[in-house]
Image (tube, grey):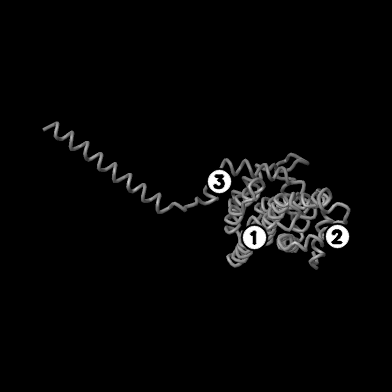
Amino acid sequence: MKGKCKVRSDADRMFNGAVAALLLVSLVACNVNYKPSFKESITDAGLRSRVSHVIDSQMRNIKDYLDDDLKARIDEGSGRGAEGLSGSEIVELTLAESAGRDYLDFCYAVDLANASDDLDGVMETARSVLPEETYSELVGMTEEVGRAILAYGDDAARSIPLNQQAAFYRDLKTLVTRSIVLLVAGVVYACIPDLVFWGKVSAACAISVGAGLVAISIMSLYEYFRFGAGEGQSFEEWFKELLKVPQADFALTTSVTAIAEAMGAGPVVTGIIICLFGLYNVVDLARTMIKTYNFDA
């Protein structure tokens, strides 16, 4: 009798295991396209560490453009004199206020895009803090850009000199992506509700990071002009010549539009962008690009 019970028990276990395996396979098959939320992938420790570092590294770029009361609280908050509040202290203060975590998530996503040029995390975190109508407009813009770039495919840069096609068009696409990141950061700051106080710091840092990335991309294109096919021309001449290439026209129009719109989002946004462009010596280059498209920024 005992032997029979053991056999039955083993059989039951095998049957239950098989059912569990089938359920697992079914779940995986049904969710093969499942992509975990960017925000869910951020640990508390990772968030605190990364955003604290961003705030510390960007504070000198943003501080002069913040509201006077916010600057005063940063300077006086820790009792450390000229040093003011540290990035980690500002992170903790931000976490304690309404929607504070969302603004830290956004700053984290923008900084992460520095290495990946990935818009998904930036857009997901922006959605948490933007009005739905504003967010929908941004999604429409980014989707249009993505479709257009994919449509050009690998053959898009063939009208650029052969030995520079791949690298140059890759730089153009990077400029588009980074300009969109900057635009989103500018819009996020412009839409911050009055009741948000400390969240403004991380949002301003996101603008600063985005502006730095765009400045680097512009300089990359400028270096191409100086040492590549455009050598011997003025920047304006090279830029107008570049517009004869449809793919470059599209990419630069999109980028300059994003920059101009972000710069028009208010004095804080404009000030931080001009500050970062100035550090990278691209203010005149950016203004030339913007004037070419008759923007008033």
Where is residue 204? Give x, y as percent: 70, 53
Q: Nearer the viewer, mark 3 or mark 1?
A: 1
Q: CA distance from mark 1 to mark 2?
A: 25 Å
- Look at the picture and state if 24 lies above or below 11: below
Q: Nearer the viewer, mark 1 or mark 2?
A: 1
Instruction: Name the residue at the left extreme.
Output: 1
The kind of residue tagged 3 is Ile
Residue placed at 70% from the left, 51% from the top? 166
Residue placed at 83% from the left, 60% from the top? 288
Provide the secondary structure element on which disc 1 rests: helix
Q: CA distance from mark 3 to mark 1?
A: 34 Å
Q: Which mark is residue 68?
A: none
Where is residue 35? Give x, y as percent: 50, 51
Q: Which residue is mark 1?
A: 152
Give the mark nearer the N terminus: 1 vs 2. Answer: 1
Q: Which mark is residue 237?
A: 2
| Quadrant in which the N terminus appears | top left
Q: Nearer the viewer, residue 179 or 53?
A: 179
Q: Nearer the viewer, residue 271 or 113?
A: 113
Provide the secondary structure element on which disc 2 rests: helix
How many marks the image carries: the answer is 3
Whether tag 3 and tag 2 are in contact, CB under 8 A, the answer is no
Give the mark nearer the N terminus: 3 vs 1. Answer: 3
| Quadrant in which the C terminus appears | bottom right
Q: Nearer the viewer, mark 3 or mark 2?
A: 2
Q: Which mark is residue 42?
A: 3
The kind of residue tagged 2 is Glu
Provide the secondary structure element on which disc 3 rests: loop
Residue 70 visible at all: no
Where is residue 167? Give x, y as percent: 71, 49
Where is residue 71? Give x, y as percent: 75, 50
Give the mark nearer the N terminus: 3 vs 2. Answer: 3
